[in-house]
Amino acid sequence: MPSSFIDLRSDTVTKPTNEMRQAMFDAEVGDDVYGDDLTVLKLQEMAAKLLGKEAALFVPSGTMGNLICVLNHCSQFGSEMILGDECHIHIHEQGGCATLARVHSRTVPTQSDGTLLLKDIEQRIRIEKDNDHFPVTKLVCLENTHNRMGGKVLTVEYIESVGKLCQQYGLKLHMDGARLMNAAVKLDVEPAKLVQSCDSISFCLSKGLAAPVGSLIVGTREFILQSKRLRKVLGGGMRQAGVLAAAGIISLTQMPKLLKLDHENAKLLAEGLSKIDGCEINPEKDVQTNMVFFLLNSDKLRMDAQTFANILKNDHGILVSVPGKFKCRFVTYYMITKDNIEYVVEQVRHILENNKNII
C-alpha cells in the first residue's frame, strides 16, 4: 500500500518505530524453541510482570494465542466454552476452536457495551456434568476492548463479577485482550488490575503497540508450559525470535503512553463526522478508545459503504474498513495525526454532500 494513503482500516497497519527497528537490529538472539533466546525471555518476563501473572509466552498472532488458550483450558474431550455472539474468537478466527480444538461454542448475546449479562452466562452453564447428552462447560471468554462493539471497554468491576461466577461453577476465565492496553489507558488502571480475575490472557503487540509481529499469552507457569507445547504443534515455534521480541519490548515500555493520544484523535474524528449530514455517529456514546464506527444514512445517500470506501481510496487517498452494507470503521494509531483527522473529516463531508439522494 503506498505510503501516501491515510490508512485508517485498522491499527494492525502500524509500522515499527525507529527505536523498534534499532532494537531489532541490535537484538541478542538464540533458539526460542530450545528456550535460550534471551530477548524473548526478557519480553516474556516483562509481560508476566505487567499483568501480574507467573509466566508468559510469545506467539506469532492473537488468533494463535486465543486458540492455544482454548485448547489448554478445554483439553477434555467434549468440552464447551461460553462466549459472546459478536466476539472476535467466534466471528473472525475461522472457527479454529471448533475445527482444531474441537471445542463446542455456546454463545450469549453481546451487549452494546461489549459485556455479556451474568444471567445469560449462568443460564448456559451445563450444571449436570455427568449428563451424557451435553458437552461439559469448561471456559468463559471475554474480549477487551471489544472490536465489533466499537472498541468498548470492560471495567475491572465487571470482569471481577464474571470471575466470581466462574469460580462459583469451577470454570476458567480467558481474556481476549488484543487491545487490552487501550482498555487500561482508558480506565487509567494498571493492566494487572484489569485481568486479576482471569486465568489466561492473550494480548497483541502488533496493533496500537506498533510491533511488526506478535502476541503474548499470560497465565500460571504450568499453563504456559503446556501452552509452549501447543504452540509448537500449531507451527508457532519461531527459533531466533529475539529479532521480533526486541520490537515487542519497545511496545511494552514506550507505546502505551501514546494510546491516550490515539483515543483523543478518535474522539476528534467522531465529533467531526457527527456534524456531517448523512453520517450517523454519537461521539460520546459510541467512541471510547481508538475505534470509530459510523453508519451512512441510506435514506439520505445514494451509496453504500463499499462505494463510499472506493471513492475515499481512489479520489482522496483514505482507507476505511467496511464491516457492513452501510457501516464503516476508522481506527486511529500513533502514525495518525490531528492534521490527518481534519483532512479525513473534510473529504468525508465533500463526498457525502455531493452524493445525497434527490427527494
Image (tube, helix red, strand yellow):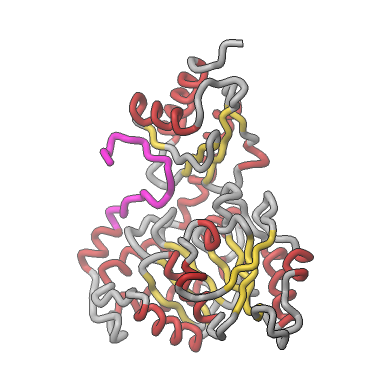
Extreme left residue here? 25
Q: Is residue 146 above or below residue 134?
A: above
Q: Quadrant of residue 207?
A: bottom left
Residue visible at 53% across and 45% down in the picture: 291
Looking at the figure, which quarter contains the C terminus? top right
Extreme top residue here? 359
In magenta, the rendered stretch is 1-19
Please say whether residue 161 is visible from this viewpoint: no
Q: Residue 138: horizontal and vertical position, in percent?
A: 63, 79
Q: Residue 337: horizontal and vertical position, in percent?
A: 41, 38
Q: Quadrant of residue 127?
A: bottom right
Residue visible at 58% across and 65% down in the picture: 190
Left or right, residue 348 beside residue 132? left
- Residue 6 included in the magenta stretch of the image: yes
Q: Is residue 287 above or below residue 162?
A: above
Q: Residue 27: horizontal and vertical position, in percent?
A: 24, 70
Q: Residue 292: horizontal and vertical position, in percent?
A: 54, 41
- Count of numbered labels shown in the rendering: 0
Q: Pick whichever, 274 or 165, lies toward us.
A: 165
Residue visible at 41% across and 81% down in the picture: 230
Residue visible at 51% across and 21% down in the picture: 352
The kind of secondary structure the magenta stretch mainly shows is loop
- Residue 326 included in the magenta stretch of the image: no
Left or right, residue 236 beside residue 45? left
